[in-house]
Image: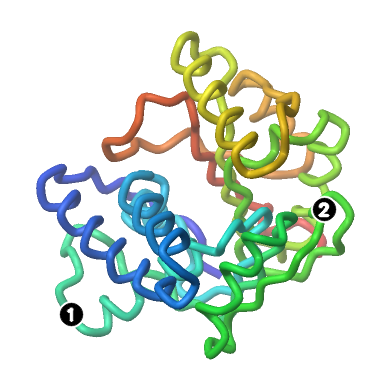
Amino acid sequence: MQTFLDSQRLPDPASDGAFRRELAQAAAERYRSSGRFAWHFARGKLAGDPLFADLLRHGQLPPRARFLDLGCGQAVLASWLLAARERFARGGWPAHWPEPPELLSLTGYELMPADVERARLPFADEARVRIEQADICRQAYASADVVTLLDVLHYFDFARQDDVLRRVWAALPPGGVFVTRVGDAAAGWRFGLSLWVDRVVTFVRGHGWSRMYTRPLADWTRALQAAGFEVRPPLPSVEGPPFANVMLVCRKPVGASA
């Protein structure tokens, strides 16, 4: 299974920015059925967070894949991937971006009931997407070709972080891809800013003032390698907030046992 492309495509800020906003608008339309909050959140998150564009423009995903999205929130990643594939099929896809992946299925696990409810209605008629309320520290994982775990690991203590990473590895086939985004605790003021914003968002979402279990990027890399993953160096990102969040694309070695 093809999972990594050797080339790194550098962004064109002007054209990429306009395309990102257009694609975000298309993906957010799905959430109008869930109310204004869900729609505004999806549009703002997809247009303002560079991670979603980075996933597509760097060509790090397989051409066809089953996805498992851990801590999926209201499942904006599913809507983004579906909108990207629809846009590619219709034409007008950026020439310097690779073909977006075909979504065979996406299973999302989310702890917060309100997020699950906001996700279920937009995908009620989409058989490929299934959202479940679940604690990812306890839930048995469905098998997948790609697992995503974005801005979630630092909510768990270090022992549970390592356990989740081992279970993600077990859910993937040899050659499977794991994408995670973590905060780099060695990034100075940018890390302090991102941690403050994360705590505010966590409080607003009803989790209270929870402790965050953070690590420097080098320690995150070592933890992923200890779980069995090959870890690529962080890829360049399009413009976004000056936070210390780093997207890491990892692979289960092709020769690994299933």
Residue extending furthest toward the left: 14
Residue at the spot x=89%, y=54% of the render? 138
Residue hosting label 1: 91
Q: Which sits in the foreground, 32 or 99?
A: 32
Q: Is residue 127 left or right of residue 211?
A: left
The residue at 71%/27% (across/down) is 209
Figure quadrant of the C terminus: bottom right
Image location of residue 182, percent across then percent down: 58, 34
Dot 2 amino acid type:
Arg
Picture coordinates of residue 18, whole percent (x, y)? 15, 54
The numbered disc on residue 130 is none
- The local crowd at label 2, few if under 14, some if 14 to 19, many if 20 or more residues have their Cα within 10 Å, is some
Vertical arrangement, residue 88 with respect to residue 75, above or below: below
Q: Quick one: label 2 or label 1, which is nearer the N terminus?
A: 1
Residue picked out by circle 2: 167
In the figure, residue 31 lies in which quadrant? bottom left
Say above or below: 67 vs 169: below
Q: Is residue 233 above or below residue 186?
A: below
Numbered disc 1: secondary structure: loop
Secondary structure, mark 2, is helix
Residue plotted at (29% across, 71% down):
26
**Vertical arrangement, residue 34 with respect to residue 164, above or below:** below
Instruction: Single out the residue that lies furthest toward the front.
Output: 36
Report, in whole angstroms, how far the alpha carbon at label 2 lies from the one at label 1: 39 Å
Kindly tell me whether residue 5 is visible in this rendering.
Answer: no
